[in-house]
Image: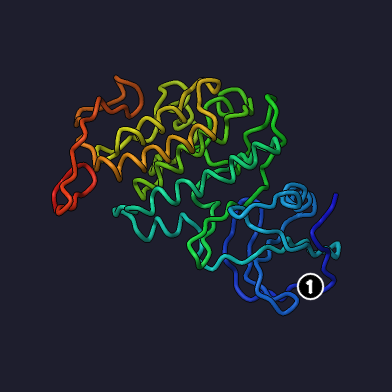
């Protein structure tokens, strides 16, 4: 197993940044630079380093090294001062990201496209696992559940986030090649709504039943453009073989963004519901944009 570097100096912990199911992350000083130091058990740490050591992508958090003295095991990562995407969305709850939505939807997709080329499934794609740099670049982190891609059995651990988990893993422990694509659809929903999926559903068994048996998904808002609503529905197909590839998702995002700029916002049919499929919107009609007018989402003048 090749690490990027193996430092001899123990990181000096400055502040606790986050506490997760697999470890604690601190802001730390190491070799005269500020880093993020993630403290884990040796087994969990080596599992994560196995993947991070071979992942070099602008939208994936960079591994700087490890510290292991047989008492403490730290993964040293680049520090992203902007916090998590989840924290940002929580701070902007009830607002719309505007043009940033398309930028961040593409940024959250790119590392998943890259992982596919290495036959890796992240298995924990969600807003809280993307970090924001000072330059508003999103970085995917937390590879504690990552697996080499294979249609196989993969236990749904207690640390898993059920609202982001694909039905096949909830139902029969099958880890599919399109597992991350389902979770990515939930991230797009988070970006559009700045909300939390299935908020208030505290009983895992109830949520699993609703997702697997009732085919329920986070509700698609009425102000959501039809191309984005279609993207969500395709990512959330219960049959993993029917989901698009991430390359197709990227093309759908680019097409939706271009159409918005060229033709303007959409007038949306207001009737939607689970009887037409989870959160399905009916056919939308485009509204031409007057060059001297600005529109809210959904075609409302302002």
Image coordinates of residue 218 in percent, x first then y, are 38, 35
Question: Which residue lies under the disc numbered 1?
Answer: 10
Residue at point 73%, 60% (across, down)? 75
Q: Residues within 10 Å of mark 1 (few under 14, many from 20)?
A: some
Residue 27 in the image, given as x and y percentages of width and height: 62, 71
Residue name at image x 68 percent, y 47 percent: 144
The correct choice, above or below, for 283 with respect to 35 in the image is above
Which quadrant of the figure contains the C terminus? bottom left
In this picture, is 212 found above or below 288? above
> Quick one: 14 or 230, which is closer to the camera?
230
Apparent side of residue 32 relative to residue 105 in the rendered image (left or right): right
Asked whether 233 or 251 is in front, the reply is: 251
Nearer-the-camera pick, 292 or 91:
292
Question: How many discs appear?
Answer: 1
Which residue: 40% across, 22% down? 214
* Rendering colour mode: rainbow
The answer to whether residue 103 is above or below residue 169 is below
Q: Secondary structure at mark 1?
A: loop
Residue 159 x/y as whole percent? 60, 44
Q: Is residue 219 left or right of residue 60?
A: left
Q: Residue at x 43, y 42 (%)?
A: 188
Residue nearest the observer in this picture, 18 or 89: 89
* Residue 201 in the image: above or below residue 129: above
Q: Residue furthest bottom?
A: 32
How far across and how far down the image is residue 25, in percent? 63, 63
Residue 97 falls left or right of residue 286: right
């Amino acid at each position: 197993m090749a690490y990027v570097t193996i430092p001899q100096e123990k990181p000096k912990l400055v502040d606790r940044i986050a506490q997760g199911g697999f470890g604690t992350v601190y802001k730390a000083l190491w070799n005269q630079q500020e880093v993020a130091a993630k403290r884990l058990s040796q087994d969990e740490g080596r599992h994560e380093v196995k993947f991070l050591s071979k992942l070099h992508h602008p939208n994936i958090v960079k591994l700087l090294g490890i510290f292991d003295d047989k008492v403490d095991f730290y993964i040293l990562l680049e520090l992203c001062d902007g916090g998590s995407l989840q924290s940002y969305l929580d701070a902007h709850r009830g607002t719309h990201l505007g043009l940033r939505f398309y930028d961040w939807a593409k940024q959250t997709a790119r590392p998943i496209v890259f992982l596919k080329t290495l036959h890796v499934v992240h298995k924990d794609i969600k807003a809280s696992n993307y970090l924001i740099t000072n330059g508003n670049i999103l970085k995917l982190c937390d590879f504690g559940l990552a697996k080499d891609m294979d249609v196989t059995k993969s236990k749904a651990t207690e640390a898993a986030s059920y609202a982001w988990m694909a039905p096949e893993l909830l139902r029969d422990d099958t880890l599919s090649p399109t597992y991350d694509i389902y979770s990515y659809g939930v991230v797009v929903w988070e970006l559009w709504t700045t909300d939390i999926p299935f908020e208030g559903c505290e009983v895992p068994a109830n949520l699993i039943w609703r997702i697997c048996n009732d085919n329920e998904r986070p509700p698609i808002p009425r102000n959501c453009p039809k191309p984005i609503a279609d993207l969500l529905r395709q990512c959330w197909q219960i049959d993993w073989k029917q989901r698009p590839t991430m390359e197709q998702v990227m093309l759908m995002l680019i097409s939706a963004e271009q159409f918005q700029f060229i033709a303007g916002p959409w007038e949306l049919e207001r009737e939607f519901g689970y009887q037409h499929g989870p959160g399905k919107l009916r056919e939308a009609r485009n509204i031409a944009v007057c060059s001297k007018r600005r529109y809210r989402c959904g075609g409302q003048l302002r």
